[in-house]
Amino acid sequence: LGVCNFLPDHLERLHAETGEYPSVDQIELHPSWQQRDTVAYCKERGIAVEAYSPLARGADLEAGDGVIGRIARSHGVSPAQVILRWHIENGTIIIPKSVHRRPQEENLDLFSFRLG
């Protein structure tokens, strides 16, 4: 069973009424909206977290002069790669969407660097 946009209160109610937790909670999650309480709750209970809109619909990518841009330049990668790597290092399931070859290739090259 998977759920979408469930917060800890919703997950508690589901567990109280069914005795079960879902396998996965799909939530909007990216560096600009980290949902730390929900992520921690899920991790403590073995619920996988899947990020929809892992790139914040591109909003985080447009901030190239900010922290993400500086990190990308220091590693010689794109801002998108930094954000997707951030998800991987935080144990988040990501399914990045791209219809263009270059971003698809970048999406495959997320393991040649580490953030921390």
Image: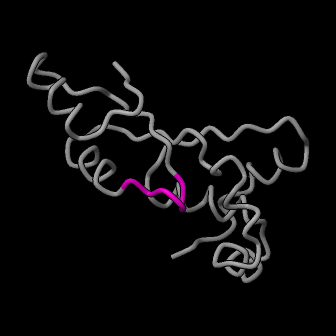
Q: Is residue 64 left or right of residue 20?
A: right
Farthest-out residue, right: 101
Q: Is residue 34 left or right of residue 107?
A: left
Above or below, 60 relative to 74: above
- Residue 84 colored in magenta in the image: no
Above or below, 99 relative to 40: above
Closer to the camera in the image, 88 or 27: 27
Closer to the camera in the image, 5 or 85: 5
Q: How many marks?
A: 0
The picture places residue 1, in percent across and down from the top left corner, at 33, 18
Colour scheme in the image? one colour
Residue name at image x 59 percent, y 47 percent: 54
Q: Is residue 48 left or right of residue 76?
A: left
The picture places residue 62, in percent across and down from the top left corner, at 76, 63
Above or below, 4 relative to 114: above
The picture places residue 97, in percent across and down from the top left corner, at 73, 37
Magenta segment = 30-35
Q: Is residue 80 left or right of residue 41?
A: right
Q: Main secondary structure of the magenta part?
A: loop
Residue name at image x 72 percent, y 58 percent: 80
- Residue 90 picture quarter: bottom left
The picture places residue 5, in percent across and down from the top left corner, at 40, 33
Residue name at image x 65 percent, y 51 percent: 55
Residue name at image x 73 percent, y 75 percent: 69
